Image (tube, rainbow, N blue to C red):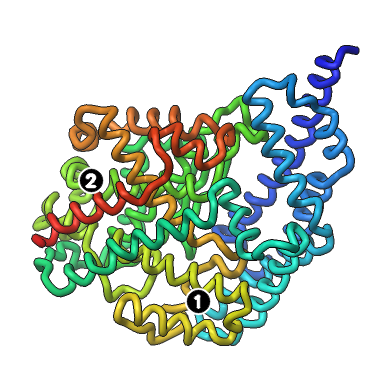
Amino acid sequence: MSSSDETAEAYDDLLSQYERISNVDHASGYLMWDQHVMMPKGGAPARAEQQSALSAVHHDLLTSDDLAEALDAVDEDELDDDQTAVVREIRRQHERAANVPSDLVEELTKAQAEAHEAWQEAKENDDFDTFAPHLQTLLDLHRERAGHIDPDRDPFEVMFEDREPHLPLSKVEEVFSDLRETLIPLIDDVRENGDDLPTPFTSTYPDDAQKALSEAALDAFGYPEERGRLDTSAHPFTFGTQFDARVTTRYHDDDPLDALMATIHEFGHASYQLGLPDDAYATPLGESVSSGIHESQSRYWENHVGRTRAFWEFFLPEVESHLSDTDDVTAESAYAAANRIKPDNLIRVEADEATYHLHIILRFEIERQLVAGEIDVEDVPEVWGDTFEEYLGIRPDSDAEGCLQDIHWSSWFASFQNYTIGSVFAAQLDATIREEFDDVDGMIRDGEFAPLWEWLTENVHSHGKRYPTDELVEEATGEPLTAEYFSEYVTEKFEELYGL
């Protein structure tokens, strides 16, 4: 057998093994979806055991000697570019996982499932003390895991690379610095000098009417019923593959825009999953490249489509059709309501496009301090309140509206920054798209969304993990990631909207 034949055989063996790993991961993900959406509360203890067992199987397959031998048997000099990318990504995952003992993986997964239930109870009862021991356990386990992966590096940076494996942490810090310079004075100017914006949605709106409105938006965007579904959950999220990408939202009876924007946001996530190539399923070329890039897709559709004046000129008839007491709502008033800056808002997922990133920076800073041991778990509520007051001038009255509001710390750390990275890249993508098409606003106004989705699929989704994050940004937009486009976009938009 020639060396090229041996490499081809080893590569096929590698793909076969990785497909099993990927399918176990997907099965675990759908169990997670069920836990958040449909599972009866009493199922939690068994679900924790099920997830723990699957995580152990996934870890054993990813760290097996068979996978290591297949990686060693592949001669990368004989591979094409796509195959090289596949091997690079499998090797990266294998090497990170191989240093983590399987019993730690199982313990961590079980602790995450238990922490999720404790977080739900703590949030419902506004009782941080209920959640604190679980948070401490997860913090200890994640530190231990990071130490196994690379004992000589900052554990936060190791955790950060779980979701942004190819983007330097220093780039995030640079982006945050640029955004502080833009956002804090802009928000202060709006608070002190901005015009009053209309509040057109003043009635109460039943969940079924809001769901119908969300479904109308998904239909307009082309979300395929045969490969997705819309459900409700405590915290909106998306999970799936290119064959089955499910979205969730939540409803507030006095704020129909919250559910609608959340649905559009989650559609953006689903569009990425659905845009991955079918024939690359269960391989790295059929997987999203990073959390930040994933978030850029949701932020693009939510902010650069769903919050545009053109969208509301297109979508107003659906609002009038599905919601009562909307006779006085105009496209302009709905546009203003969808973009209102709310500096007194305490909740991240209800934050506006400008203050949102101060919510993120706050969490990023607290996570870094926690992981570094600079603050203790019991300090979190006070530090949260102090930092929130410093950045936005208000302080939460309860932990449910403060440090207990997010689901993330019941599972992992070092992930919040991805939301801001996604917003920054979304603005960069939007600028590029507006150079590619003559009249993007006209397309949105006419409900012509397919060309936008097709462009994003061609330039982002279809690559899977072919390019590392920084290379994909340049491939799609022609330049490295920069906060410049977001800063220009948000300043121009809100100065015009608020008459500054």
Q: Looking at the image, which residue is at 64% across and 51% down?
A: 29
* Image coordinates for residue 381, horizontal then vertical, percent: 49, 84
Under circle 1, the secondary element is: loop
Image-based side of 221 in relation to 116, left or right = left
* Image coordinates for residue 83, horizontal then vertical, percent: 68, 26
Against 449, residue 372 (above or below) is below
Amino acid type, label 1: Leu
- Label 2: how many Cα within 10 Å (few below 14, some 14–19, many 20+): some
Q: Earlier in the sequence, mark 1 or mark 2?
A: 2
Amino acid type, label 2: Glu
Q: Which mark identifies residue 318?
A: 2
Against 335, residue 104 (above or below) is below
Q: Indicate the quadrant where residue 466 lies.
A: top right
Q: Are marks 1 and 2 in contact (CB under 8 Å)?
A: no
The C terminus, quarter of image:
bottom left
Q: Indicate the quadrant where residue 20 lies.
A: top right
Q: Looking at the image, which residue is at 72% across and 39% down?
A: 90
Which residue bears the numbered disc 1?
404
- Label 1: how many Cα within 10 Å (few below 14, some 14–19, many 20+): many
The N terminus, quarter of image:
top right
* Image coordinates for residue 429, horizontal then vertical, percent: 35, 39
Under circle 2, the secondary element is: helix
Decide if residue 361 is in sight here: yes
Residue farthest to the top? 2
Against 406, residue 463 (above or below) is above
Q: Indicate the quadrant where residue 19 lies.
A: top right
Q: Looking at the image, which residue is at 74% across and 19% down?
A: 78
Q: CA distance from mark 1 to mark 2?
A: 35 Å
Q: Which mark identifies residue 216?
A: none
* Image coordinates for residue 91, horizontal then vertical, percent: 74, 40
Depth check, front residue: 34 or 357: 357
